[in-house]
Every structure is written in C-alpha cells, then in structure tokens.
Image (cartoon, rainbow, N blue to C red):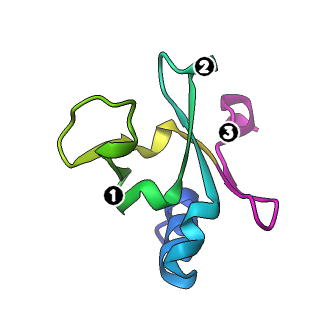
Amino acid sequence: MVKKNPLKEVLERIFWALPEERRKDMLVYITHRGAFQDVKLTTLDKVVRFSRGYIYMSSDDLDGVDYSDEVPIPFHRILKIHDKVEDETLYEKKSDKEKND
C-alpha cells in the first residue's frame, strides 16, 4: 500500500470539503529566503491549485515580483497550515529529528 503525503491529504480535505471562501482563513507558513526569519506567511486563497509535490500560488501574492501567472512552491517548503478560525494546526512539517525517531 502506497502511503500518501500528509500535506497532500490536508490540502485535498481543504480544497474539496470546505467552501472556497474558507481558504482565506487558512494560514500557510512557507520557507522563503529573504523574508523575515526566512518564513513567508500567506493564505490558501492565494493557492491556485496543487499537484504532485507542489502548490501553485497566484503571482499577485509574491512580493511584487513579475512572475508567470502561477508560481510553483515545492511541498518541502511548506512548514505549517493553520486554521485561524478554529485555532487548529492542520499540518506541521516534521523536523529532521522527528523524522528519524
């Protein structure tokens, strides 16, 4: 049996089970070099789609830099997804130490 990526499972639940307007309540913490503490905070309503190993964000949300319409962000850069309405962390990346335990 193939084990699914836990982040992909969370994204599928959010995108297919919740109303689209709830995505703005989902905070996404992304590793982003050059940002304060190398972490960028955005919301899932900026995510256009996701596929195998990537989320694709609207270029409108990325620091005013002129990109194509969608900017791919690899899953390994997503640190956390937090529902601010329910005050619940839906996904948090495991540290290297946790992965080895």
**The residue positioned farthest toward the left in the image shown:** 68
Task: Assess whether mark 2 and mark 3 are in contact (beta carbons under 8 angstroms).
Answer: no
From the image, tell me which residue sits under label 3: 99
Look at 54% across and 82% down and name the residue there: 19
Eye-nearest disc, 1 or 3: 1
Which residue is label 1 attached to?
A: 52
Q: For residue 2: magenta?
A: no
Of mark 1 and mark 2, the one earlier in the sequence is 2
- Residue 95: image x %, image y %? 69, 33
Left or right for 62, reference 27: left
Nearest to the observer: residue 1 or residue 29: 29
Q: Which residues are magenta?
A: 81-101
* Residue 36 disc label: 2
**Alpha carbon separation for disc pair 3 and 2:** 26 Å
Q: Amino acid at mark 3?
A: Lys
Per the model, the C-alpha gap separating discs 1 and 2 is 28 Å
Instruction: Examine the structure image and report whether residue 86 is included in the region drawn in magenta.
Output: yes
Q: N-terminal of the two: label 3 or label 2? A: 2
Q: Residues within 10 Å of mark 2 (few under 14, many from 20)?
A: few
**Quadrant for the C terminus in the image:** top right
**Residue at the spot x=38%, y=36% of the render?**
62
Q: Amino acid at mark 1?
A: Arg
> Is 36 situated above or below 27?
above
| Label 3 CA crowd tier, 10 Å (few <14, some 14–19, many 20+) | few
User: Residue 57: percent from the left, percent from the top?
Assistant: 36, 50
Element type where label 2 sits in the image: helix
- Tell whether 96 sits left or right of 17: right
Identify the amino acid type marked 2: Phe
For the point 51% across and 58% down, which residue is it? 44
